[in-house]
Amino acid sequence: MILALTVHFKGELEHKTPKGRFKRTNRKKFVTQLIRMERREARIRRIRNKLGRQREVVPVTLQEHHHIALSQNSPIHIGTFLQENASDPAIKV
């Protein structure tokens, strides 16, 4: 039962692929454009496999998905920063 659902779900996802590609065409000679897109994606997959890279790991939790750097937890007022570092050539516009 689970295998059948998995195959059906994968089939539904594959049905979306050409629709998404078609949106990226100019609707003139779209078959040629669709073939080029598919070949390009296949080349990219082959290159990734040769390099041994797999797809990116998808974050599971919100903490992993929305990572905020520690420096953003203690903001600095930009006006004060500019006044204190007025002589610094790096902040000259």
Image (cartoon, rainbow, N blue to C red):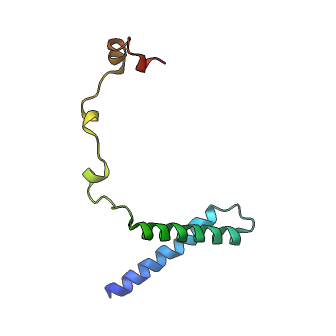
Count of picture labels:
0
Q: Quadrant of residue 24?
A: bottom right
Q: Nearer the viewer, residue 34 or 49?
A: 49
The residue positioned 38% from the left and 87% from the top of the image is: 4
The residue positioned 31% from the left and 52% from the top of the image is: 65
Q: Nearer the viewer, residue 25 or 15?
A: 25
Image-based side of 48 in relation to 59, left or right:
right
Image-based side of 6 in relation to 24, left or right:
left
The residue positioned 44% from the left and 78% from the top of the image is: 10
Q: Is residue 26 above or below residue 16?
A: above
Q: Quadrant of residue 25?
A: bottom right
Q: Position of residue 12 (x, y in %)?
A: 48, 76
Q: Is residue 21 above or below residue 82?
A: below
Image-based side of 13 in relation to 19, left or right:
left
Q: Position of residue 88 (x, y in %)?
A: 38, 15
| Residue extending furthest toward the right | 28
Q: Position of residue 18 (x, y in %)?
A: 58, 71
User: Which quadrant would the N terminus be assigned to in this image?
Assistant: bottom left
Q: Position of residue 53 (x, y in %)?
A: 39, 65
| Residue extending furthest toward the front | 50
